[in-house]
Amino acid sequence: MPYTGYMHAESLDTDNDRLQPWRGDLVCRLQGTAEPPELSQDGDLVIGGIFSFRTGQDGVIDIFQTIPQRRKCKNFNFREFKFAQTMIFAINEINRNREMLPDVELGYRIYDDCGTMDILRAAMALLSGQKTDSFENNCTKSDPVQAILGHSGSRPTISFARAVGRFHVPVVSHFATCACLSNRREYPTFFRTIPSDYYQSRALAKLVNHFGWTWVGAICVDNEYGLNGMAAFIQAAYEYGVCIEYSETFSLSGSVHELQRIVKIIRQSTATAIMAFLSHREIKVLAKELYKQNITELQWLGSDAWITDHSLTASEGHHILLGSIGFTVSRAHIPGLEEHLRELHPSQFPDSQFVRDFWEDMFDCSLNVTSEAQKALCSGFESLRDVDSQFTDVSELRFTNNVYKSVYAVAHALDNLFKCEDGQGPFSNGSCADVTHIQPWQVLHYLHNVNFTTKEGERVYFDRNGDPPARYELVNLQITNKGTMEGVTIGIYDASLPVRYQFMMNNISAVWGGGVTKVPLSVCSESCSPGTRKILLKGKPVCCYDCVPCPAGAISNVTDSIHCMKCPAEYWPNRNRDTCLLKDIEYLAYGEIMGTLLALFSLLGAFMTVATILIFYCHIETPLVRANNSELSFLLLFSLTLCFLCSLNFLGRPSEWSCMLRHTAFGITFVLCISCVLGKTIVVLMAFRATLPGSNVMKWFGPAQQRLSVLAFTLIQVLICILWLTINPPFPVKNFTHFKDKIILECALGSAIGFWAVLGYIGLLAILCFFLAFLARKLPDNFNEAKLITFSMLTFCAVWITFIPAYVSSPGKFTVAVEIFAILASSYGMLFCIFLPKCYIILLKPIKNTKKHIMGKTSNGK
């Protein structure tokens, strides 16, 4: 408590004056009563500590009709008492170490208070010292501690750290994790040996993302610790694409209806993973209520405030928390601490009521002879060496090690202060601190620059905000062989490493919420498999969506894709639409059935034409061959052979040369063929004219003229083809548009005008030939070749008229097949219509192949 001000000795009550030895004028007197520490030891330099050996507190409302008293604490918190004993152990260890703070004895003042108000009162007592009266000239001078260690809770630490900071006294906490304490403007003297909740929150968000939980709930205690921790977690979770279904606050001081409301929200939610930024007190109450209402199979993510608390096992409904995971500080080993704890005896602290209560509770006996309690007197032979309890258990030192590091951090700061050499100091003009009058702000400076390594090899230092490096172990609550629920380490997190190496899982099997052995799901919507994409639902968070297949020609090759990627032009999705495959290349090949059949028909036509040539050649002197213009017949058969063979050029993979050759060869050979037919038709007409009296027309269309006409008609087509190939020839092309899943290799026409000019010229000659043959159809029988030509031209024109729409509408390789079919059909039509009847007479009816027979028919025709 601070001193009230200046007072003259004459104005004081004489009875009070007699209580003090006379040392001069009394200057100040402490208002109220002094706050003695629970545990203390004198020393040249004193370190203060604030812990809560008891966690419960009677609910009392001050009416200020009497002086407010300290509230009575209840229940035991062995962990907090172990923290205090660890502080004492570390100070005694440092005092025995002659290399650190030689000739300086460290002392301690440790307060045991619960409740924020009493904890703040203890902090003020550490600042003011223990003097009731002051006889110094300046009553503001006191005997404060060099630093204050504690408290374990963020809320009380926030309360007194702000006030203590105004006096520049360092505060080092081993368990206060609220990220708000990193604010140097509000808490300029605060340090801690446990990472800030900012790092824990981000680690928890990364953990949620690691297990694919995109739909989680969040509950926090209604104070700075919980609110700041949950805010940091939610922000980090959003960065990882995690959605928060609900975020609620909870406090033990709230009404029962508030607890029921939280439980109702959990029951009705679809999120199975719940982030709980609570202390061990709130999580016990919440787990108990959930157990009563049989709400199980929840996956809890715990903050370090409760995830490794040993008292959870003793709470009702603790099986609800089985499988919980969370981050906590790394475990450590402190040599000699167990012996120190087991050597504890009430005689060491005769003025400590808590040590007496602790001893009586531990051994169920009474140290007070006058006690009315129904307990036997302690024999004096009790020893903690024979007891296994939470207090003496050093198998898993986590936060206890933080207390140990806190003491050594202050000791190293003081040691560096004492070892300062004049002229090389950190203060003005290179000065050092006056070791006889050490100022708190000087200790604060050295504490900022502390950097040492513990016996376990752990490096200890603070950043500019007073925070240590963020290192955690990922623990999983499992039932051990002893029947207790303890945290088993299943991974590590180190924020000082590169991002990809910060979080690592080990090979230890984990137990999950509800006792299951596989990772549970906590999603609003099932993951969209590759081949689909996410479509957000209107009015819902981004984690709630539908999965729709990728459109034709697009794929998604990752889970939960929001876009589908279009495949390159030469690729097409597979059936699952998660991979782009090379499209099938299609062209009319020799090896497929249709190509083979067309090739066979082409060769068969060529063979039949050659056979016809041989028949005619062997019977070239017969009247039938001679009467039908054998020269044009042989030329016609030769051109038909070329027509059959040119269709083979349309088969196979298109190339630059084959594309130019297939249409031009087809056009020229067909013109040659029709020119011969046209010549034969004209010969028939001229021959009939020549039989008329006085006609000499045949001299104008003799063999020479026939050859010239065929040559002229063919040269026109050759000229058209040369122009086509010169200006814009056909070329091979990949057609991506006709079929989406295939590539058609085809020959582009180049110049469509050239193509249709070739076809048009063939059609013109065919129509002319058909017209002339039609005129000669009723000539005498010996000129009956005109009828055969008429039928052949009728077949030819029918085929090519049908070809045009079929060619335009046929897809892919069928376009080429239609063209080959038209060539073969028209070629077979001319071969059969013109030459088949003649071969029939030559081979099977030779009696009709005589001049007498032919002349006889002529006479009869007249």
Image: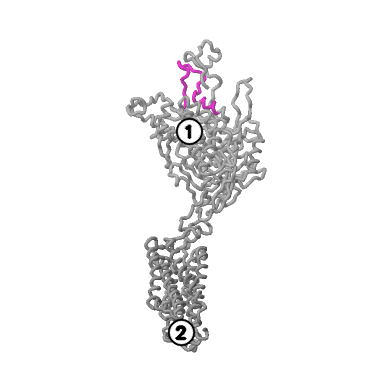
Left or right, residue 678 beside residue 283:
left
Q: Quadrant of residue 33?
A: top right
Of the numbered discs in the image, which one, if any, rests on residue 182? 1
The picture places residue 187, in percent across and down from the top left corner, at 48, 29
- Res 283 quadrant in image: top right
Observer-nearest of 355 and 859: 859
- Secondary structure type for disc 2: helix
Farthest residue, direction top? 10
State the mark number for residue 136. Answer: none
Residue 384 lies within the magenta run: no
Q: Check disc 2 and report the residue beneath it.
A: 624
Q: Mark 2 Cα within 10 Å, few/some/many (few <14, many 20+)?
A: many
Instruction: Indicate the position of residue 522 as horizontal and vertical percent values.
Output: 58, 47
Mark 2–mark 1 CB contact (< 8 Å)? no
- Residue 198 showing in the rendered view: yes
Asked whether 265 or 35 is in front, the reply is: 265
User: Please, which colouring scheme is shown?
Assistant: one colour
> Which residues lie in the magenta part?
119-145
Residue ID at (49%, 72%):
771
Q: Specify the farthest residue to the front.
A: 694
In the picture provided, is 557 more to the left or to the right than 451? right
Classify mark 1: residues with Cα within 10 Å, few (<14), some (14-19) or many (20+).
Answer: many
Q: Earlier in the sequence, mark 2 or mark 1?
A: 1
Q: CA distance from mark 2 to mark 1?
A: 118 Å
Tell me the amino acid under the disc marked 1. Answer: Ser
